[in-house]
Image: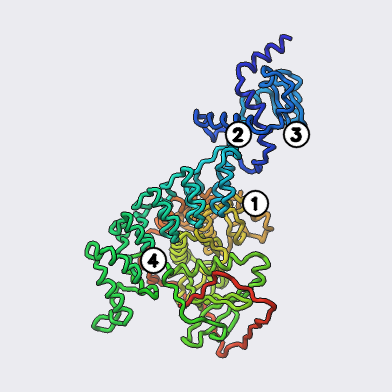
Amino acid sequence: MADNKIQQQKYDTDYTQIRAQSYAPFQVTNLHLDDGQTNIPNDEIERSEENEKKFQDYLEKQQQHDDPREALLKQYSKEDRPYKIVDLNNNCVYDARVEEDILKLTTINSMKSPSTIKNNKPTWQDFWKNVKKCNIDLLDAAEIGNVDKIKYLLDKSKNLYPVDLNYQSLDNYTALHFSVTDMHNQIVQILIDNGCNIEAETTFKRRPLHLCCIIGNIDALKILIKHKAEINPLDNNNNTPILLASQNRWHEIVEILLDNGGDPHIKNNKGENAVNVCDTQNMYDVFMKHKIYETEGFVLKDNFSNFNKKQNGQNQNEGGQVEEGKVEENNSEQGQRVSSPEKIRNLINKEGIIEMQKKTVQDYEYYRILGSGAFGKVILVKDKKNQKYYAMKIISKEKFQQLNLMKYALSEKNAMSKMQHPFIVKLHYAFQTKRKLFLIQQYCGGGSLGRMLKIKQRFDEQTAKKYMCQIILAIEALHDNLIIFRDLKPDNIVLDEEGNAYLVDFGLAKLGVYDEINKSFLGTPAYLPPEIIVKDGHNRMADWYAVGIVLYELLMGCTPFNQGNVSREVLYERIKQNSIKIPSNISSECQDIIQKLLCKNPKKRLGYKNDGKEIRSHPWFEGIDWEKVIQKKIPMPKPVIRTIPNEPLDVRFNEECDKQIDVQNWTEIND
């Protein structure tokens, strides 16, 4: 009897904890909201007054729901019920005041002692694990456009757990950033109606309005403006939304922003503003309509006069040479983009995609197979009209459709058509037949960097640095346009006749996900970062990890974790657990950049804070003239040029089939 009094006194002093323990832990398990993979340390969630209130609100909601425990607890008085613990796994009720019941619970539920009940850690931890899972579910639903899931998570009568509308993923992306980027505008409206922060910033200070202006999401832009979003916020590079819209040739968005107070004269870190990057007739007309004729000495009309002269071949000096400092980067039906060499930025081909003549397989002569795989081939071809050589990638519609891989073919085409960059293979044409998809790409006669590495076995540090400079600029350009490459390796880097490096094969590229978390398990095993292997979500930092692997491979002749041709399971364990060993003959600066690029924590990896700019600022690149790199003025090692047969092959395409497989959005792209 005395023992019972002591037990009674012990638990009376902590009534709240016992009551919480009696209601929460088993209910959480039976809701099946915890997948068992989320691991939150006990001290991660601060025991603040606000968090305690959320927790208590949750407990009250639990009681209001149709709870199967109520039937088991009806027989007990109100005074006794707070001390009862219900195990729904076997429908038993235990009394926290009875030592025998505590011992049973210790055995059944693997509790070490009654003190485990008193300190309430399992309940608190389970609750916040499920809160975190709901927040991650919100991000996932915003990414894939699951409207019903969004509504469920925000419905307090159905979802017992509080949801943070401004919950941030890697690089501080919120659900609103995701839905804007992927053009799920119904979700954009729902999130804003429920009070999300429309001015939330990513790590690079990009707000949802910035993203609208990069990808051209006009509807989301209108929603944000309607809800009083700031019109002229600056991102990490001091880009305003209207400047990004002008760069990306979204003239309709520029006009909307001008009508709502957008300032076209604000300059970014490169001295650019929305006016002096204007390079299409549509954009020119918008600025003329709003009587914006010049900005700090830059006369829009004169600039377009120069464009027209250049188109007519009239911008030559007296010696017949093209004016120095004017580089033709891209043709379009609206005008030409002319960029001075000091402007290191990639060029985006949107209005520049021209539908002129329709290409067919009969327009080419076929010379040799450059590569082949399970789903198609790459063939060296020559255009019969202009006599230029191209790499024709042929994709089997049937095989891609059977394996549900068509989205990857579309991603490749879309990513390549979006980019115009000195170190990214250019897509000239895209067309389709009944059974096949065709991509006509720039041909690089030097073969792949992987091929050259096999010939040389390894490169000295200075040679490797030259390749890395070009690769880093290409990856940085992709990220700046919200694209993750996801399959960087020497075999996906090709060399032109001068030895310059180009990214190729965008089959695994993901558009619109610059800062987004992806849980896909994609890529070549030896180049995968730990976060992909553990399926913890990945973003652009996966590309920078692969840059580190490629740099190591160029210097060592092999990847760091795949030595000895080990099994995939062993390889993955090494990637997750092993550290990098670098020979002492490699400079300390080079060792340092490799170690920092291969950091297993993506948030601590080099490039997380400021992407490519941060990597280019590393001491290993000290003395590099990046202007000369972008202009291809740095001498590169000459590759072994592939030979081209004198006579073309006899190639015939069998298009006889029962039905035609149409691939939507496979736009006819012309040079």
Q: Earlier in the sequence, mark 1 or mark 4?
A: 4
**How would you rate the neighbour count of disc 1 (Cα within 10 Å): few for under 14, some for 14-19, many for 20 or more?**
few
Position of residue 253 relative to residue 166, above or below, is below
Q: Earlier in the sequence, mark 3 or mark 4?
A: 3
Residue 330 drawn at (x, y percent): 39, 73
The numbered dot on residue 233 is none
Kind of residue at badge 3: Asn
Kind of residue at badge 4: Arg
Quadrant hosting residue 112:
top right
Q: Earlier in the sequence, mark 3 or mark 2?
A: 3
Query: Which residue does the numbered mark 4 point to in the structure image?
Result: 249
Q: Work out how far the residue at label 2 is from the one at label 1, CA to CA, in angstroms.
A: 29 Å
Say what secondary structure mark 1 lies in: helix
Query: Which residue: 60% across, 62% down?
Result: 524
Say what secondary structure mark 3 lies in: loop
Q: Work out how far the residue at label 1 is from the one at label 4, CA to CA, in angstroms.
A: 46 Å
Q: Residue furthest left?
A: 297
Kind of residue at badge 1: Glu
Q: Earlier in the sequence, mark 3 or mark 1?
A: 3
Q: Work out how far the residue at label 3 is from the one at label 1, CA to CA, in angstroms.
A: 36 Å
The numbered dot on residue 573 is 1
Q: Is 377 in front, or is 302?
A: 302
Kind of residue at badge 2: Gln
Residue 115 drawn at (x, y percent): 65, 23
Residue 512 drawn at (x, y percent): 49, 59
Q: Work out how far the residue at label 3 is from the one at label 2, CA to CA, in angstroms.
A: 20 Å
**How would you rate the neighbour count of disc 3 (Cα within 10 Å): few for under 14, some for 14-19, many for 20 or more?**
few
Mark 4 or 2: the one toward you: 4
Query: Which residue does the numbered mark 3 point to in the structure image?
Result: 89
